[in-house]
Amino acid sequence: MAAAAKDKTSTKKVITVQSKDDFDRVVAEAGNKHVLVEFFATWCGPCALIGPRLEELAQEYADCLVIVKVDVDDNEDLAEEYDVSSMPSFLIIKNKIKLEQFVGSSGEKVQSTLQKFCGKRDEKTTTAAGAGPSQKPNRVVSMIKVVSPSKANVMHSDKK
C-alpha cells in the first residue's frame, strides 16, 4: 500500500514547498506563469478537501500556472509575510508580484480566480495540457463554421 501511495505522489503537479528559500525559488522559476499559492495546515479539514481539486486545476492550467502549497505550521515566516490568518488562504503571484489574495475552500472561487488571470480553459487548451481527448473540439469547429461568413450568408445579407 505504501508503494501505491508513492506512485500517486510522483504524478502530482502541485508543489509543496519546504522553506522560504524553496518558495522563492519556485516563484522565480515560474517565470511568466502565474503562481497560485495555497496556505494550508495539516489539521485543516477544508484544506484537505480542496487538495484533490488543486491537483486537477494544476493539470488543467499547466500551460499558464504553477500551484504551490505552503504549510503554515512549517513556514510561519511566509504566513506572516503574506498576512495569512485563516486557512486555506490563496494568493495569485506573477513575476514575484502579489495580484490577489482570498480565503476559503470553494473550488468554484479558486477556478473563477484562475479564469480571471489565465483565461477560461477551452477544449483546445485542456487537450493540449494533457487532459486527454475530448469530443468538444468538434463542437468548437462547428461554432466557428456557424460564425464564419460564407458566400451564401454574404449574398443573403446583401438581399436584405
Image (tube, rainbow, N blue to C red):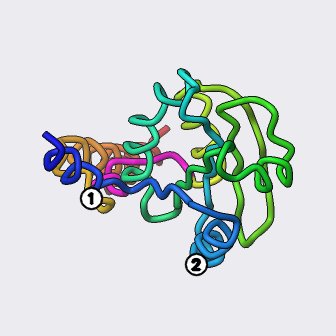
Crowdedness near tag 1: few (<14), some (14–19) or many (≥20) residues, C-alpha within 10 Å: few
Mark 2: secondary structure:
helix
**Of callouts 2 and 1, the N-terminal one:** 1
Q: Residue at x 61, y 46 (%)?
A: 71
Is residue 50 covered in magenta? no
Q: Disc 2 and disc 1: Cα gap in Å?
A: 20 Å
Is residue 31 placed above or below 149 in the rendered structure?
Answer: below
Residue at image x 37%, y 53%?
59
Say if the magenta span includes residue 121. Answer: yes
Q: Residue at x 65, y 50 (%)?
A: 74
Q: Is residue 154 visible?
A: no
Q: Say above or below: 58 vs 94.
A: above
Closest to the camera, between mark 2 and mark 1, is 1
- Give the amino acid type for the residue marked by disc 2 in the picture: Glu
Residue type, label 1: Ser
Q: Residue furthest top?
A: 45
Q: Which residue is mark 2?
A: 29
Front one among 73 and 115: 73
Residue 108, given in percent of the width and then of the height, sits at 55, 27
Count of numbered marks? 2
| Residue 10, numbered circle | 1
Mark drawn on residue 38: none
Give percent across and percent down for residue 22.
61, 70
Give, as a single range, the part of the protein colored magenta: 119-127
Judged left or right of residue 139, residue 148 is right
Give me the residue at 72% from left, 31% from top: 103
Q: Is residue 96 left or right of residue 32?
A: right
Residue 73 horizontal side relative to residue 133, left or right: right
Q: Quadrant of residue 127?
A: bottom left
